Amino acid sequence: MHPLMLCIHMEKERALRFSFAAMSLGVRVRMVEDSQLGQTLGAACGLDAPAAHGPGGRVAEEMLLLAFLPEDTLDALLRALRATGLPPVRLKAVLTPVNRGWDFARLYRELAGEAAAFAAGGGARED
């Protein structure tokens, strides 16, 4: 599979600036529209057939979902995103066998909960 970055609940101009950084590394970029939030992460990344899905749950903050990136490309992408000078995206995830069946609302809940736990413990860090 080709390296992929999904921009979720992100303002288009911001996503465009991040897209240039990603595409310079050969990473495809796709915007996830609100109407697509009910599909599974696997379907959104092209692994699973799109199925009938509900409207999806609430996603109140922008997120990035990264898929099919070799480790060196992932590291280079994170550096390139920082180099844009834009404020970092707080909620980022990599597609895994565990989260492949989740919808975007579930991903949001998991990432937001994890970020809150890190912040409460003083271990929060922005990449």
Image (spheres, grey):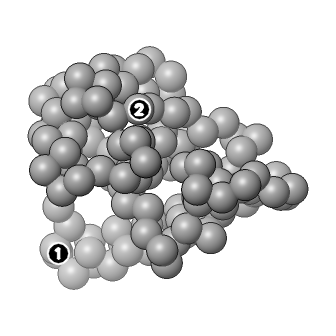
Which class describes the residues within 10 Å of circle 2: few (<14), some (14-19), or many (20+)?
some
Mark closer to the observer (2, 1) = 2
Judge by depth and name the residue closer to the eye, 52 or 80.
52
Q: Which amino acid does label 2 sit on?
A: Arg
- Where residue 23 sits: x, y (%)? 31, 25
Q: Is residue 7 above or below residue 103?
A: above
Judge by depth and name the residue closer to the eye, 44 or 17.
44
Q: Residue 21 carries which label?
A: none
Dot placed on the residue nearer the N-terminal end, 2 or 1: 2
Q: Residue 122 carries which label?
A: 1
- Where residue 127 sits: x, y (%)? 18, 51
Q: Residue at x 19, y 26 (%)?
A: 84
Which class describes the residues within 10 Å of circle 1: few (<14), some (14-19), or many (20+)?
few
Q: Residue at x 26, y 75 (%)?
A: 118
Q: Which residue is drawn at 26% across and 42% down?
A: 88
- Where residue 105 sits: x, y (%)? 63, 62
- Where residue 56 sits: x, y (%)? 75, 56
In the rendered image, is residue 127 in sight?
A: no
Taking the image as shown, residue 15 lies to the left or right of residue 45, namely left
Taking the image as shown, residue 69 lies to the left or right of residue 106, namely left
In the rendered image, is residue 118 in sight?
A: yes
Q: How many marks?
A: 2
Q: Mark 2 points at which residue?
A: 28
Q: Which amino acid does label 1 sit on?
A: Gly
How far apart are labels 2 and 1 at the CA level? Answer: 34 Å
Mark 1: secondary structure? loop
